[in-house]
Image: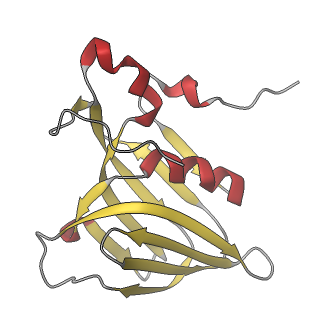
Amino acid sequence: MVEDARFEDGKESPLRLKALDADDLNVIAALVQDAVFPAAEMQWDRKARRFALLLNRFRWEDADNAPRHGHERVQSVLVFEDVIRVQSQGVDKSDPEMVFSLLSIAFTPGEDGSGRIELTLAGDGAIAFEVEALEVILRDVTRPYGAPSGKAPSHPS
């Protein structure tokens, strides 16, 4: 019998996750809730059909250890593959220093594995992707560091 990974399994090591269905994407969405990123760290490679974000995400998977080492964040790359089209609303791309906060990720399936992924941002912003197939990758790329606020955001839903 194969056992699914548990939320607690990633506590002290970097995350490397891939979502190929809506249930997988829900796990990644919970882990990146309240992540922050500057406009300069968004990139759509139209030719490769890839949209990527470099996020500073709260380490929800290790929040129980905060009394030992404090609340932590880590830089992670969030990659959306097979992107056909990108749309945004309320996202000012002209200011590379503008910082966005990711509230949620949702997937609406289409025909034959295609669909729409929508990132909801704080302040009524949104980024949507039309995808040929659902493939999302989350990978931590730095060591954890102390959360600048010293606090945890409200717990993911």
Percent x, y for residue 35? Answer: 33, 52
Percent x, y for residue 66? Answer: 32, 21
Quadrant of the snapshot with the N terminus: top right
Occupied quadrant, residue 94: bottom left
* Depth order, front residue of 82/5: 5
User: Is residue 129 something that shows in the picture?
Assistant: yes
Q: Residue at x 46, y 70 (%)?
A: 119
In the picture shown, does residue 7 fall above or below 107? above
Occupied quadrant, residue 146: top left
Q: Residue at x 42, y 78 (%)?
A: 127
Occupied quadrant, residue 14: top left
Name the residue furthest top: 68
In the picture shown, does residue 43 fall above or below 137? below
Name the residue furthest right: 1
* Depth order, front residue of 5/72: 72
Q: Residue at x 76, y 73 (%)?
A: 113
Q: Is residue 102 left or right of residue 27?
A: left
The scheme the figure's colours follow is secondary structure
Q: Is residue 70 left or right of residue 129?
A: left
Name the residue furthest front: 154
Percent x, y for residue 105? Answer: 52, 64
Q: Is residue 8 left or right of residue 119?
A: right
Q: How many marks?
A: 0
In the picture shown, does residue 142 fall above or below 35? above
Q: Residue at x 48, y 80 (%)?
A: 128
User: Is residue 12 something that shows in the picture?
Assistant: no
